[in-house]
Image (cartoon, helix red, strand yellow):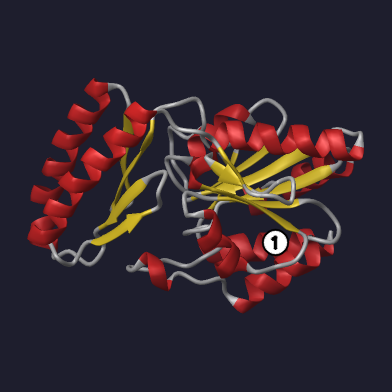
Amino acid sequence: MKYVFKDLPNIKNRLKKHNLALLLDFDLTLSPLAKNPNQAFLPKTTKDNLGKIAPQIPVVIITGRKLSDIKKKVNIKNILYIGNHGLEHSLNKKYEVVPLSIDTKNALLKAKKELIKICKIYPEIIFEDKKYSLALGYRLIKKNQIRPLECIFKKIQKEINHEGLLEARLDKKTFELFPLMKVNKGTASLLVLKKLKNKFHKKFTPIYIGDGQTDEDAFLSLKKNGITIRVGKKVKSSAKWYLNSQKEVNFFLKWLSSF
């Protein structure tokens, strides 16, 4: 991985040759760290930079949050939104959702009951029922409780993966469950590019910025032609470039808005 601000001339040359689309994760990419997910917010300077970019090139937020939630938190005109890791979106100016099978819905309901039991044992956990996925945030848990809790999560993860209906991911003090199907931030990114091509009758080169494990699906899908940027350097990442922090994402957006 190359550091963005040491490779700007190369990135700039690539940007000049293509029609661009900006694809972004939200938490820890646009929003600073929030121990309670409900308290995550879009800083004013970041919002201003996105507001300058949106009239110039397509901007899409792709997040694990509920679609209604991310729209409220960003609230910028001319921006497209995809929620629940690609399961719901409003790319055609109307709400669309990927249908789930009865078995998958029942599996989510069963998992929800189990997760609620864990929340009763660890009341500091923030439980998010996003209808099409579930998440437990445990940044408020005491340090001596983290390891036992993660052991519980890993056991559930093993059981979930064995059943083959849901996928479980443990990343950055968040335990997520979502349907095991060919829908993720990678497929969502490709869907966006396809719809943009159909609308404007030209191909777009994506700049994708994200920080987590679920963003790796997008880095992999866009690896051939995209400008993929991970927030936080990681040896095994499929991203080509990296930025050190959410603040540096804002510096990059400021540079991009002037570019």
Q: Position of residue 69 (x, y in %)?
A: 51, 62
Say which of 254 and 48 sits in front: 48
Query: In the image, what residue occupies the spot 54% across and 60% down?
Result: 68
Classify mark 1: residues with Cα within 10 Å, few (<14), some (14-19) or many (20+): many
Residue 120 as seen in the image, left or right of residue 57: left
Residue 204 visible: no
Say which of 246 and 90 sits in front: 90
Residue 48 visible: yes
Residue lying furthest right: 201
Which of the 4 image quadrants contains residue 54? bottom right
Give the vertical position of 115 relative to 192 (above or below). below
Q: Which residue is mark 1?
A: 253
Residue 15 as seen in the image, left or right of residue 8: right
Give the vertical position of 209 relative to 201 (above or below). below
Going by the numbered disc 1, the residue's amino acid type is Leu
Question: Which quadrant of the rendered structure holds the C terminus?
Answer: bottom right
Residue 140 as seen in the image, left or right of residue 3: left
Residue lying furthest bottom: 44
Say which of 8 and 64 sits in front: 64
